[in-house]
Amino acid sequence: MAFTLTPEYILHLLNEAAAANPGPFLEALDHKVRWRIGSEVKDDIAKTGVYVIGNKAYVEFNSEGTQNNGKPYNNHYFWVLIFDGNGKATEIREYLDTGLVREVFSNN
């Protein structure tokens, strides 16, 4: 049976991971997945959501929290997930404020 990529499938993977159950997300990764992290540009006006075109899912989301040092941690993310015909993610491109992440690891 051919796999059909849908926004519901992506939301299921991400919601499970957010609920401390990364199993479905990890199982959806191809064993040779390429995960690229890049961009120190922060885009405060990005909309959030899940968009699927063909075998690619585009996911925009935000995270908010408090660092151990009491400062806020508010980051914006954009992922491009590329899936094969079996429903396995073969590549993930992640864009976020890496400067903020560096600050968190340096100051906490």
Image (tube, helix red, strand yellow):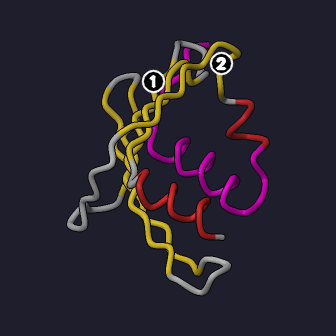
Seen at 51% across and 57% down, the residue is: 101
Q: Is residue 65 left or right of residue 42?
A: right
Seen at 52% across and 14% down, the residue is: 84
Helix, strand or loop at label 1? It is strand
Q: Nearer the viewer, residue 28 or 63?
A: 63
Q: Position of residue 75 (x, y in %)?
A: 43, 64
Label 2 crowding class (10 Å Cα cut-off): few <14, some 14-19, many 20+? some
Seen at 46% across and 38% down, the residue is: 6
Name, please, the residue furthest toward the left: 45
Does 42 lie within the magenta span?
no
Label placed on residue 41: none
* Quadrant including the C terminus: bottom right
Q: Position of residue 18 (x, y in %)?
A: 66, 60
Q: Position of residue 37 (x, y in %)?
A: 46, 36
Q: Is residue 54 left or right of residue 15?
A: left
Q: Give the total number of marks visible in the rendering.
A: 2
Q: Nearer the viewer, residue 61 or 43?
A: 43
Seen at 70% across and 16% down, the residue is: 31
The stretch in magenta equals: 1-22
Q: Nearer the viewer, residue 86 or 44?
A: 44
Q: Is 9 situated above or below 53?
A: below
Q: Is 64 situated above or below 88?
A: below
Q: Position of residue 65 (x, y in %)?
A: 56, 77
* Quadrant including the N terminus: top right
Q: Amino acid at mark 1?
A: Ile
Q: For marks 1 and 2, give the CA distance.
A: 10 Å
- Residue marked by disc 2: 30
- Residue marked by disc 1: 82
**Can you tell which quarter of the image residue 46 is in?**
bottom left
Q: Amino acid at mark 2?
A: Asp
